[in-house]
Each structure stands twice: as structure tokens, then as C-alpha cells.
Image (cartoon, rainbow, N blue to C red):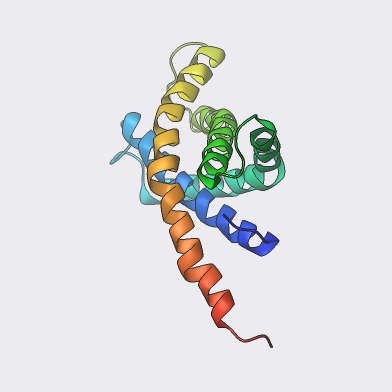
């Protein structure tokens, strides 16, 4: 886990990028849009999703999730418990907000959405949470932590102070 503001910034960038790419393609596949939406459309969704997710992570969900996760009663001396609790709180918060973002994008692109807004939203939240939690805990989280320590933090330690 990063301990500096700069490390936190890089961690947030990499985590958002990985989760947005994974969740975008998951949602395109589950909605049968792979092959029907253009590459330009996918790139626009990725860019808008990344910007939205990163702003949410930095200003809204991240601070609240960390505050909640660190206020829960568990042994904070064990790093794995801290990582799991923050990750769970982050996934819950991001899924709630980004599902709303995705639903808004679907409405703007006039994609057919069955049922009422609330019904569609809660269905999307459940579907996204089921995929986002394992994606974060098993793939993106460990990969980003590895990349952060191997390529970002190691370089900082290897460079002489100038």
C-alpha cells in the first residue's frame, strides 16, 4: 500500500484504469454490445468512465471508504485485513456510483433498458458487484500493488536525490 501522496496518486490511477477497463468490457459483453459498438464508441466509454471513476475515487469514494474501513473493529496490525476492508468499501462505493454512470450512459445512447429506473439500477448494481469484487481482489488489486512496488516505488528508491 502506498504511504505517500504521490504513491497514492499513482496507485489510484493504476487501480482506476484496471477496474474501468475490466468493468467496461464486462458490461459490453453482458449487454451483447461487443461487435456492435465501434472502437471509437468503446474508447469514448473507456475515457469517460476513467475520468469519472478517478474523480470519484480521489474526491468522494476513496476518502469515505478509507474512513469507514479504518473505523471498523478488526486487527489493523495485519496488513491483509486493512487491504481487504478498504478494497471492499471501495468496491461497494464505486459500484454504486459507476452503475449510476453506466445507466446514465445507456440512457444517453438510447440503449433499450427494461423496467423502471430503480429496477434497472439495482439490477445493474448487483450484476456489477458480483464481477467487480473478485476482479478487484484477485486480479487488479494484486497486479497494481505488484506494479506499484516493482516499477514506481523501486525507481524512487534507486534514484539519487537531486
**Residue 17 appears at what percent x and percent y?**
49, 52
**Residue 88 appears at what percent x and percent y?**
53, 34
The number of numbered discs placed on residues in the rendered structure image is: 0
Q: Quadrant of the N terminus?
A: bottom right
- Name the image quarter holding residue 111: top left
**Residue 48 appears at what percent x and percent y?**
55, 46
Answer above or below: position of 141 versus 103: below
On screen, residue 7 versus residue 120, left or right, reads right
- Name the image quarter holding residue 36: top left
Query: Residue drawn at (36%, 46%), measured in percent from left and top?
Result: 38
Of 22 and 92, which appears nearest the observer? Answer: 92
- Name the image quarter holding residue 6: bottom right
Q: Quadrant of the C terminus?
A: bottom right
Kindly tell me whether residue 24 is visible in this rendering: no
Kindly tell me whether residue 112 is visible in this rendering: yes
**Residue 39 appears at what percent x and percent y?**
37, 50
Answer above or below: position of 44 versus 71: below
Of 23 and 138, which appears nearest the observer? Answer: 138
On screen, residue 153 versus residue 131, left or right, reads right
Query: Residue drawn at (48%, 44%), measured in percent from left and top?
Result: 45
Query: Residue drawn at (68%, 33%), measured in percent from left and top?
Result: 68
Of 82 and 155, which appears nearest the observer? Answer: 82
Query: Residue drawn at (58%, 39%), measured in percent from left and top?
Result: 86
Amino acid at each position: 500500500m502506498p504511504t505517500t501522496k504521490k504513491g497514492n496518486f499513482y496507485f489510484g490511477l493504476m487501480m482506476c484504469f484496471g477496474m474501468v477497463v475490466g468493468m467496461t468490457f464486462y458490461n459490453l459483453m453482458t449487454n451483447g454490445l461487443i461487435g456492435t459498438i465501434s472502437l471509437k464508441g468503446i474508447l469514448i466509454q473507456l475515457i469517460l468512465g476513467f475520468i469519472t471513476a478517478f474523480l470519484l475515487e480521489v474526491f468522494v469514494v476513496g476518502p469515505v471508504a478509507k474512513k469507514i474501513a479504518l473505523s471498523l473493529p478488526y486487527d489493523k496490525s495485519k496488513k491483509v485485513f486493512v487491504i481487504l476492508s478498504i478494497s471492499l468499501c471501495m468496491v461497494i462505493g464505486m459500484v454504486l456510483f459507476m452503475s449510476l454512470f453506466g445507466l446514465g450512459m445507456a440512457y444517453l445512447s438510447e440503449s433499450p433498458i427494461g423496467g423502471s429506473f430503480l429496477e434497472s439500477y439495482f439490477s445493474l448494481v448487483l450484476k456489477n458487484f458480483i464481477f467487480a469484487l473478485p476482479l478487484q481482489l484477485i486480479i487488479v488489486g494484486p497486479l497494481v500493488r505488484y506494479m506499484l512496488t516493482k516499477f514506481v516505488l523501486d525507481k524512487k528508491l534507486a534514484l539519487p536525490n537531486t
